[in-house]
Amino acid sequence: MQISRRRFEQLAAEALDAIPRPMLDASENVAVIVEDRPGPDLVVAPGTQLLGLYQGNGTKPAGIMPRGWAPTPISLPDRITLFREPLAERAHDEDELREQIRATLVHEFAHHFGIDDARLDELGW
């Protein structure tokens, strides 16, 4: 289906509002952004489309910091990127797209919490 970037961002905001509150409350410093498509540097298996991407450190403890390390006052957020065109290509209407966006957000937030794809498959995500 065709959808404008503005409308897609509205649906993404609605889907984000529908994410379970405990999941959002437990997440730390995460920005959700929209891109049209994954860049050429993001290679996936043939025949698959990347719908979303989590990039960051997650909520797992980072361990012991090296000698001389000092925290910086500003920490860049982890990122969840939603890819508008691949998500829209999978949907026939806005209701399906809204559900695809929600499922992608849950999947990517799971990565933020350290859950890998194998475990997500076991859980049906």
Image (cartoon, rainbow, N blue to C red):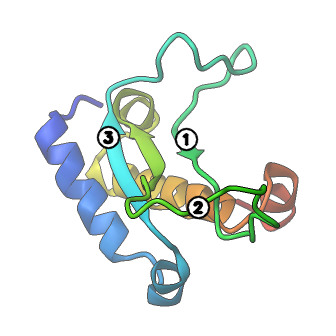
Instruction: Please provide percent x and percent y for residue 33.
Output: 33, 46
Above or below, 83 against 102 in this view is above
Name the amino acid, label 2. Ala
Mark 2 = which residue? 70
Direction from residue 12 to residue 55 in the image, left or right: right
Q: Are marks 2 and 1 in contact (CB under 8 Å)?
A: no
Name the amino acid, label 1. Leu
Q: Quadrant of residue 53?
A: top right
**Which mark is in front, 3 or 2?**
2
Q: Please state which of residues 2 and 118 is positioned toward the viewer in this rendering.
A: 118
Q: Earlier in the sequence, mark 2 or mark 1?
A: 1
Instruction: Please provide percent x and percent y for residue 107.
Output: 61, 58
Q: Residue at x 52, y 75 (%)?
A: 27
Q: Please state which of residues 22 and 4 is positioned toward the viewer in this rendering.
A: 22
Q: Earlier in the sequence, mark 3 or mark 1?
A: 3
Instruction: Please provide percent x and percent y for residue 85.
Output: 36, 27
Name the amino acid, label 3. Val
**Which mark is in front, 2 or 1?**
2
Above or below, 32 against 16 in this view is above
Direction from residue 71 to residue 96 in the image, left or right: left
Mark 1 = which residue? 53
Quarter in which the N terminus is drawn: top left
Q: Give the secondary structure at mark 1.
A: strand
Above or below, 72 against 16 in this view is above
Mark 3 = which residue? 34
